[in-house]
Image: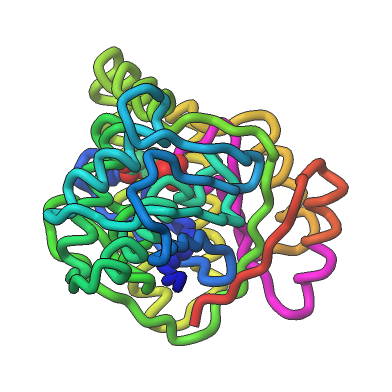
Amino acid sequence: MKVFGTAAAKIILFGEHAVVYGHPAIAVPVSTIRAAASVDLSHPSHSTRLQVFAQDVDRWVSLDESQEDGLSASIRRAISLLGFEPSGMAAAIHSDIPLASGLGSGAALTAALVRAVTLANSQYMSNETLNAIVYETERIHHGTPSGIDNTVIVYEKPIYFRRGHDLEPIRSAAPLMLLIGDTGISAPTKESVADVRRLYEDHPLEIESVLNQIGQIAEMSRALIESGDLLQLGRNMTDNHHLLQELTVSSHSLDRLVNAALAAGALGAKLSGGGRGGNMIALVEPTTKRAVSDSLLDAGAVRVIQTTVT
Ligand code: PMV
């Protein structure tokens, strides 16, 4: 018998990078793009390998120490943190989430697998424990993650997040229709986070001011989401993008997609996640959705995904 565990992708609406320094940020799950793990209970013995089919990956991951890459290391770490010995581990993960693109693929793969293994072993795990496990595996990829990715993915609801504080769920007064445009360029978050750290060390006053402004935008945007002021929310997204440019985490491809979305009538647009590549998001209305999507594809997006936050 096979049992399954799944987890959603995520996007950051406001506050990436500044959230690492304790400023607030807002993230939402993208429930239509998921990682799904299966564990086959009828398998007679432990397997030391796990099959992973993710977008752009189709490979076996070794659960012994022979593979040194991040994915194997984080899966091994998750299993070692489970608190029990998994049995009958014939496991596979299928994921639609592009890797290293700001959509939380690593956290979602781990969360899905831990859910499946826990279920297969008739164990109960609270979201709090799962969140702590996924955070630990995120540290392998990101070094000093803020914790926003694992939190929004494990709880799968829109959140206002501050490092070291309990998550605060937020409710949107009006549906937020978003397009996610993928540059198709994978960019490790660890590097952009490290570059921002260096920039901060070299120019403390200027960068402190940029981080503060990003935090203020995130704070103000929470109220706008809760009151349904989409026009100002869109402007805030674009302002947030300009501040991320000052942190040097945008790129030519991301800027091109953001400009294309705005020119086609989006209410606002920004990069989402670590930046340098990966994805951007645009806030659209039913009347502009089609034109913005076409414009993103014309400007080089390899795919455009629609999601609505309610
Ligand atoms: O994993 P990504 O690319 O979605 O980026 C996470 C957001 C950052 O603020 C850049 C890093 C962090 O740990 O919060």
Q: Is residue 57 above or below residue 110?
A: above
Q: Is 12 left or right of 187, judged from the image as shown? A: left
Which of the 4 image quarters holds residue 201?
top left
Q: Nearer the viewer, residue 149 or 286?
A: 149
Q: Position of residue 287 (x, y in %)?
A: 78, 78
Q: Quadrant of ligand 1?
A: top left
Is residue 268 located in the magenta-colored stretch of the structure? yes
Q: Is 138 left or right of 263, judged from the image as shown? A: left
Q: Is residue 278 above or below residue 208?
A: below
Q: Position of residue 58 (x, y in %)?
A: 62, 41
Q: Nearer the viewer, residue 152 or 121?
A: 121
Residue 217 visible to the viewer: no
Q: Nearer the viewer, residue 69 or 51?
A: 51
Q: Is 100 left or right of 145, judged from the image as shown? A: right
Is residue 218 located in the magenta-colored stretch of the structure? no
Total marks in image: 0
Which of the 4 image quarters holds residue 231?
bottom right
| Span highlighted in magenta in the image | 267-292
Q: Is residue 188 above or below residue 310?
A: above
Q: Position of residue 292 (x, y in %)?
A: 78, 61
Q: Is 8 left or right of 83, judged from the image as shown? A: right
Residue 36 visible to the viewer: yes
Residue reaching furthest to the front: 44
- Quarter of the rendering occupied by the N terminus: bottom left
Q: Which residue sits at x=23%, y=60%?
A: 130
Q: Which residue sits at x=37%, y=62%?
A: 153
Residue reaching furthest to the top: 202
Q: Position of residue 255 (x, y in %)?
A: 66, 38
Q: Nearer the viewer, residue 72 or 3?
A: 3
Q: Which residue sits at x=55%, y=52%?
A: 238
Q: Which residue sits at x=64%, y=47%?
A: 55
Residue reaching furthest to the bottom: 173
